[in-house]
Amino acid sequence: MQPRFDSKTAVVVSISNRGGGAFGIAGGARNLHVGAVCARAFAQEGAHVWLVDEDADALRTLADEIRAAGGRADVLIADPCDAQALLDLVARSGDTVGPVHALVNGHFESTMGRVEGSTAAEWLRAVQVNLLGPVHATQAFLPLLKRAASADGGAAIVHIGSIDGTLGNPQIPAYSAAKGGIVPLTHVMADEFGAYGIRVNCVARAMMVERGAPPHPRFAPLVAQTPLGRPAYPDEVAAAACFLASAEAAYINGVVLPVDGGRSGITPGTRRQPPEPT
């Protein structure tokens, strides 16, 4: 079977963690950052992946890992949340990158807290990373997405959101509010960019741990309310992003896809106890 993104280019923006101890990724480990996971998946599907972040060491480590596995990866160093830095990056490197068939906005930063006692700086930072970061990255790479759509019949943007942005997590209120903005952002971008042949969708992920690793203790009550009874595995989140960016999803536009084991599909607190084993 031919890889989904053979002879195509994917740009993954933000591959390293910010704000250590992040809720939603067990331990906040770098190798579990959703952007890095998506980059590996797109490379495995044949894409030439361009990695964008300000963490040069993380970029080079991930690019080397992808190349060692037989994939193609290059790095672009810039703050993924800085509008001007991203515009300058594309102006400087756009001809080298060429048409972009898929843009993945993996921006993520989360800190525990409450609304009461939180600071303006904390809220501004949450919005800057989790909401404005995807806006700035999309604006910067839009000309290259248009080139791909014009030449090859389509391109796609995938935002990595969160079910916390739909439901609201009281333990991470600023993150929840910022990710909540990704939902209408996905809808309005899908409408605006559809005219260019560019689809825009969102993966609303939940808690995530590596296969075989024990869930973080703070995940226990969430697992108890998840019909599948476990956190997501990184490759499952990345698979959803790859699907939404692929030709298989050519008529899917403006969708927010929960990847949460069914947790957001039931009324909180009403889950039936699993049947006893027979």
Image: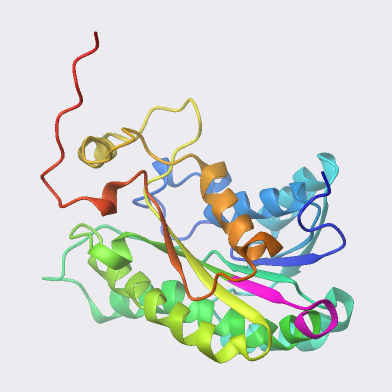
The answer to whether residue 165 is above or below residue 184 is above
The percent position of residue 191, horizontal first and vertical second, equals 51, 88
Could you tell whether 253 is left or right of 60 in the image?
left
Q: Residue furthest top?
A: 278
The magenta span reads 149-157
Q: Residue furthest front?
A: 251
**Residue in front for this viewpoint, 181 or 80:** 181
What colouring does the structure picture have?
rainbow
The answer to whether residue 110 is above or below residue 71 is below
Residue located at (43% from left, 77% from top): 131
Specify whether residue 179 is in view: yes
Q: Quadrant of the N terminus?
A: top right
**Residue in front for this viewpoint, 167 or 155:** 155
Could you tell whether 166 is left or right of 19 in the image?
left
The percent position of residue 162, horizontal first and vertical second, equals 38, 61
Residue located at (57% from left, 43% from top): 235
Residue located at (22% from left, 59% from top): 169
Q: Quadrant of the C terminus?
A: top left
